[in-house]
């Protein structure tokens, strides 16, 4: 068996996003012990970095040693007990997943459905809670399946009014759009490393606020998961002298996350949000120049991830295969209702830049010509001033 | 905030073990998409490698995208339903953990206790099962907390006789001592990457045999965990054309695991077992030359991890701090009943070699002299022929 050689790819799908060379290099430093004082100090730094990035003073702000899917489940499994009522806003795949996971926690789950490709409507949530209260309300701030941004600030305010806890999926939101946990009053947030943080996939930052910790303390039964039990995990992240063994942290992945967070904070959080927004507008203009329709109304679009309609007559899989094989370019397929109808283009983290936009638009133009959809796609980009 | 610079450490604790440079380099290759055909082909290769290493044809042999602690829980949560009877053999921390996790799955848990520092006794298990049957029997083949090896072959035979399923913790066993899933008839096995496989921590190989899959198919209720649901995970690892999205695999960690498995298979599995055994004997002889007592009877000792008694009058924490700061050497503290009474020295994977043994023994000798325990420790090693 031969050593694996990773091909050169331009990652412009829904994640993983391209990882900066210094992040890859950081993660390839020699492994040290997870109980080493130097590693414990690094864990403390990562927690501080995450607090800055998430806009919170929550002491309980740590990366879970598993993908964001596990962090989603961890939040639910810690706060929900059998029979608890939970309202899940569903406007895409990840809302659907939240509801399914909550059912496995034996909660009473109500799904509040919104059109896919549209934001969660705060007034609908208010009405649903007036009709029947819930212990927990869940939504996805940045729906990775549809490229839609929902208004976490407005939704959190409604939760506060009625005394419900909030759980927010920030997987594609983190570092790409504003998240202000303390200012908005979010109770639980989970995120991923492989989107706008531009670290390799595998870890999942979470932040747990005081009201959620009170709910956890008031549980009658221990959470169904030992690996994800926030009481035990909190002890593991408690710092030098107080730390209790729980599992072996993925040491090298934490090195990489630290470097990714350092790069982000060096750029500045607001600068990162603005960069994601400005580059998204550039991409949208270029797609429109190609005559490609964007599937989400502009006010609800997610800058890091754009949902676009597949031009008529184009074979979804064949076109993406061509992009990958001819241009080394990965864009994302549609998910759920959008499978075969839409693509997703990510401009995330290290990958949100003008070179990537030009490359993507030029590759799309070439593909449209190759598949006989539009002969003049490249000239249309020239006319729109897109770099060749 | 400054970039993190990992210190140089000699890892000779209970894990993580030292990682080969080519494994670190492999994991630092550019991230590619987890749905990329090249990555899916890599996932297939990793599954083949794991089958070889675990001695099985089980199609369901994959690395879980999380630490071994999660894999332990995943096995229990998939096979156990509320009220199921499970017999857990407890001879250390990880048996205790298995029992606690099984309780969180709402199973009826019986713990069969053995002295810490001693192996699980097959005849005691046979008697316990005769007295009361169990759906599942769990044990730890290589107890990382005590450095003890139990006889999985004998224990599996007993399970087969009575029709119980077996679940075996092979975290420190994999690549360090023989595991022959098919020959012995083990039903479920989980392992870790950061011990004798010498990959960074963060992934956990599992292998699930046909009888366990039948039990999974016969469940009345879906497993309590969605992230760890083996039905969903199996779809994710099903290969090109059949793969169903579940979570985002930790792409770079899988690169590293592939390279670590490649190195192991290049050396040869039996050669690796023999190397671990031979080096363990060298370490034991050297420790005895220093007058240090080994805490486990020789027939039950685990070659990759040795439990030794802290010499009288030595301050546990101060001594280990001295080794770390003066020699860059990490050895492990005792856990549970052995905290403050014993240390653990690992000779795992890439770290099981004569240079490491000499360095460790010389550092221990220096420490014993430094702390006034024994002035002639170094000459004792000279006399025993330990390399300086």
Image (cartoon, coloured by chain):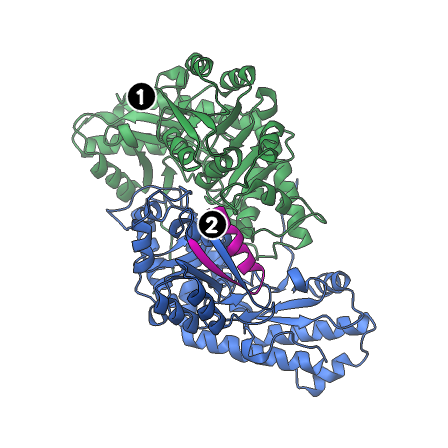
Chain colours: A blue, B green
Name which residue lies at 26% across and 21% down.
B291
Q: In this view of the protein, can residue B192 be seen by the observer?
A: no
Residue extending farthest to the right is A372
Residue on which the image places disc 1: B294
Q: Residues within 10 Å of mark 1 (few under 14, many from 20)?
A: some
Q: Which mark is residue B248?
A: none
In this image, A256 relative to A376: left or right?
left
* Marked residue chain, label 2: A
Q: Quadrant of residue A184?
A: bottom left
Position of residue B200 measured from the top left corner of the image (x, y, whole percent): 47, 44
Residue extending farthest to the bottom is A383
Taking depth in this image into account, of B95 and B230 the one nearest to the observer is: B230
Taking depth in this image into account, of B292 and A98 the one nearest to the observer is: A98
| The C terminus of chain B sits in image quarter | top left
Position of residue B128 measured from the top left corner of the image (x, y, whole percent): 42, 16
Q: Which residues are magenta?
A: A85-106
């Amino acid at each position: 068996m031969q050593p694996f050689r990773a091909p050169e790819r331009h990652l412009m799908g829904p994640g993983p996003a391209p990882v900066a060379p210094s992040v890859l290099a950081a993660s390839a430093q020699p492994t040290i012990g997870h109980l080493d004082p130097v590693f414990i100090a690094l864990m403390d730094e990562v927690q501080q970095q995450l607090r800055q990035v998430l806009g919170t003073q929550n002491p309980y702000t740590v990366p879970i040693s598993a993908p964001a899917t596990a962090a989603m489940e961890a939040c639910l499994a810690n706060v929900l007990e059998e029979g608890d009522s939970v309202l899940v806003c569903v406007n895409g795949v990840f809302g659907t997943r939240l509801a399914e996971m909550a059912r496995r926690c034996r909660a009473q789950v109500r799904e509040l459905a919104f059109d896919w490709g549209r934001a969660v409507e705060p007034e609908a949530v208010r009405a649903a809670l007036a009709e029947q209260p819930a212990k927990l309300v869940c939504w996805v701030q940045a729906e990775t399946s549809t490229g839609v941004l929902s208004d976490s600030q407005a939704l959190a305010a409604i939760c506060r009014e009625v005394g419900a806890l909030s759980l927010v999926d920030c997987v594609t939101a983190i570092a790409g759009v504003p998240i202000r946990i303390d200012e908005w009053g979010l109770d639980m947030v989970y995120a991923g490393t492989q989107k706008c943080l531009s670290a390799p996939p595998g870890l999942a930052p979470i932040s747990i606020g005081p009201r959620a910790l009170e709910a956890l303390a008031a549980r009658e039964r221990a959470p169904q998961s030992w690996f994800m039990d926030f009481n035990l995990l909190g002890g593991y992240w408690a710092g030098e002298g107080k730390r209790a063994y729980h599992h072996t942290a993925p040491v090298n992945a934490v090195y990489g996350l630290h470097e990714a967070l350092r790069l982000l904070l060096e750029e500045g959080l607001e600068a990162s949000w603005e960069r994601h927004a400005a580059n998204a507008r550039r991409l949208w203009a270029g797609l429109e120049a190609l005559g490609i329709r964007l599937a989400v109304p502009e006010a609800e679009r997610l800058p890091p991830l754009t949902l676009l309609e597949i031009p008529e007559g184009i074979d979804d899989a064949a076109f993406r295969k061509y992009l990958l094989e001819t241009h080394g370019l990965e864009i994302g397929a549609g998910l759920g209702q959008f499978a075969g109808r839409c693509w997703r283009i990510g401009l995330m983290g290290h990958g949100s830049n003008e070179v990537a936009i030009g490359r993507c638009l030029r590759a799309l133009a070439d593909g449209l010509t190759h598949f006989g959809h539009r002969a003049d796609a490249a000239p249309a980009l020239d006319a729109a001033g897109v770099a060749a």
